[in-house]
Image (cartoon, rainbow, N blue to C red):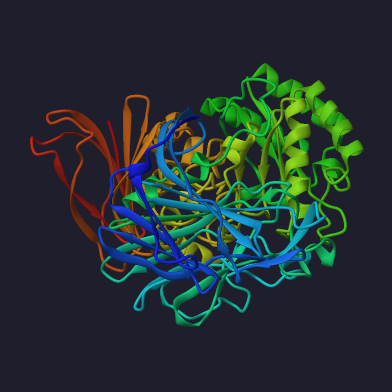
Amino acid sequence: MKYAFYLLLFTVFWANAQTPTTTVTSPDGKLVVVVSLEEGKPVYNVSLNQKPFLTKSPLGLKTNVGDFSEGLAAGKPAVVNRIDNSYELPTIKTSKVHYVANEAVISLTKTNVPAIDITFRVSNNDVAFKYKVYPQKASRSCVVNEELSGFVLPAGTTTFLSAQSKAMVGFARTMPSYEIPYTVDDTLGKNGRGNGYTFPCLFKVNTNGWVLISETGVDSRYCASRLLGRPGGLYTIGYPMPDENNGIGTSAPGIPLPGETPWRTITVGESLAPIVETTVPFDLVEPRYEASQKYQYTKGSWSWIIGMDSRTVYDEQIRYIDFSAAMGYQTVLIDALWDTQIGRDKIAELAKYGAKKGVSLYLWYNSNGYWNDAPQGPRGIMDNTIARRKEMAWMKKIGVKGIKVDFFGGDKQETMKLYEDILYDANDYGILCIFHGSTLPRGWERMYPNYAASEAVLASENLAFSQRSCDMEAFNATIHPFVRNTVGSMDFGGSALNKFYNANNTPNKGSKRVTSDVYALATAVLFQSGVQHFALAPNNLTDAPDWAISFMKTVPTTWDEVRYIDGYPGKYVVLARRHGSTWYVAGVNAQKEPLKLTVKLPMIAAGATYKKYSDDAQLAGKVTTETFPKNQKTELVIPTNGAVLLVK
């Protein structure tokens, strides 16, 4: 990382000794953050193009060694830096990133003793801040009991949020798991179901634009947080609920002194483009350890989503290995209960059989321990260092490529340590990690080189569980690219081509898919995750359209660039992603009426030919080859529950 000092980029005004004000401006000068002390209390506000996006909002921490939210005074003058950092990361939405920001480190004292630093970084469209706590008297550690960091949205703002669930509820007491449905265009002043909201949180600020609030850089050194709704448009940081993880472990994080908190992030835009395209979760963090090898990010098949528990048997997994090989996929995910329904010796045989066909295994594990009642095995392995490393040595020996660990059910610091321990140990054995029933990833793609993806969303399994989830499928697909998937890889496990969620694609058995085949292809582009296990089935080789199977054979799982084209959360979405020199433009419509849009696509050259996958009014798909017009504009017509896909 390169640092240079540009004092003229920042202005520090000293109205008097008690009311210093620091103004931090983005490199393009459009995004402005003003930080000040008012009667000893730190506050800030955020504006873009002179329009307010966050009004006067509180800052500060309360710890067991001091209250650093009031009675504060200015310390040494603000330290100002220019941040200029380039990095490459194949598993996020943009593979090559150039991050430029202006930074101010604001030092505050209490009773003439250094108390906290508040660091603000402002890039074009992104604001981030964190705290550093200093030793107080003889203290060399502290518990952060409360963080007062707040976000005050202007009156009239509407919300697009997923409520935090109660702890120790749901299946086998495994929640919270970031799986509550989103509400869209809701009003300020609510607090979800009484427990706040899960990150990330999206807001529409009147006609000014959009705000996305989240956090990044959370690891074993802190807990994950949520957003608590309060009156007057105020939202504040909330720590985990005491009864998460069966009540074991503290809700409040502990840190050594001096010590830092994770980054709080605020992405601001007059359109949704900065929200969709932001890389701020990764810009602010650094790798926690080096990769033990060069990891390959792949796509594969997955029997459980269609066949459920009863199909986790040897012969079915042979069939899916053959299916992955036929699709040109490199992996197959063997889900829960393989330990009892297949057995370790037979898993080793499957791994050997798959290797001959160029197909490696991912294996499912229960995160386990004392924090849930989930009966599925293997249990009692991933929560214990000795058992875990022994298991991973076995996996390496037989050639297992990755693991899917499920049922975490909490955000406490102790649970963050478990995630990190699993990742660190897995790296020693060259194993990639997917997490389900899990928390949101917070910069983990860059922090942990063998991290692949997390669920942390109401994912494809719910389509198999209920018809209502199928009926809401397109609605949810128009939300995730603007909220959940903006900050991290999302292991959705979708793109089903079966009409019915059962192993034989039998009519009137199980829930029925109401979306089109083109929709299934489009979500393979819309939903970003470096590793994908699609909800396809072997029968699709004969009962799905040839053009659909051909596309699913070649669709990438890693991307070099993303561009927002058009959309509105809960209504429709059109995005473009680039892999190498090929652009994929995908759109989905969840509205009751057909969608007609004229969009400009400057990434496709005038006169170029491209493939167009489209639906008619009955959701019957077709593929045509078309020529792009000179003005680089095209009309998209998308029926309800349908999609469109352009490939050039």
Q: Where is residue 584 in the image (x, y as percent from the top left)?
A: 33, 36
Q: In this view, does 396 lie above or below 266?
A: above
Q: Please identify the residue farthest to the right as the structure is shown.
A: 386
Residue drawn where x is 21% and y is 40% of the image: 601
Residue drawn where x is 10% and y is 36% of the image: 629
Q: Where is residue 470 in the image (x, y as percent from the top left)?
A: 50, 62
- Which quadrant, please, contains the C terminus? top left
Query: Can I make out residue 183 in this image?
Result: no
- State the count of labels: 0
Q: In this view, does 564 lie above or below 329?
A: below
Taking the image as shown, residue 248 lies to the left or right of residue 192, namely right
Q: Is residue 641 above or below residue 584?
A: below
Q: Nearer the viewer, residue 505 or 71?
A: 71
Query: Can I make out residue 29 in this image?
Result: yes
Q: In which quarter of the image is residue 163?
A: bottom right
Q: Is residue 394 above or below residue 199?
A: above
Q: Where is residue 592 in the image (x, y as percent from the top left)?
A: 31, 69
Q: In which quarter of the image is residue 295?
A: top right
Q: Which of 300 and 217 is in front in this view?
A: 217
Q: Nearer the viewer, residue 557 or 265?
A: 265
Residue drawn where x is 57% and y is 40% of the image: 285
Q: Please identify the residue farthest to the left as the structure is shown.
A: 630
Q: Nearer the viewer, residue 247 or 284?
A: 284
Q: Quadrant of residue 325?
A: top right
Q: Position of residue 60 (x, y in %)?
A: 59, 65
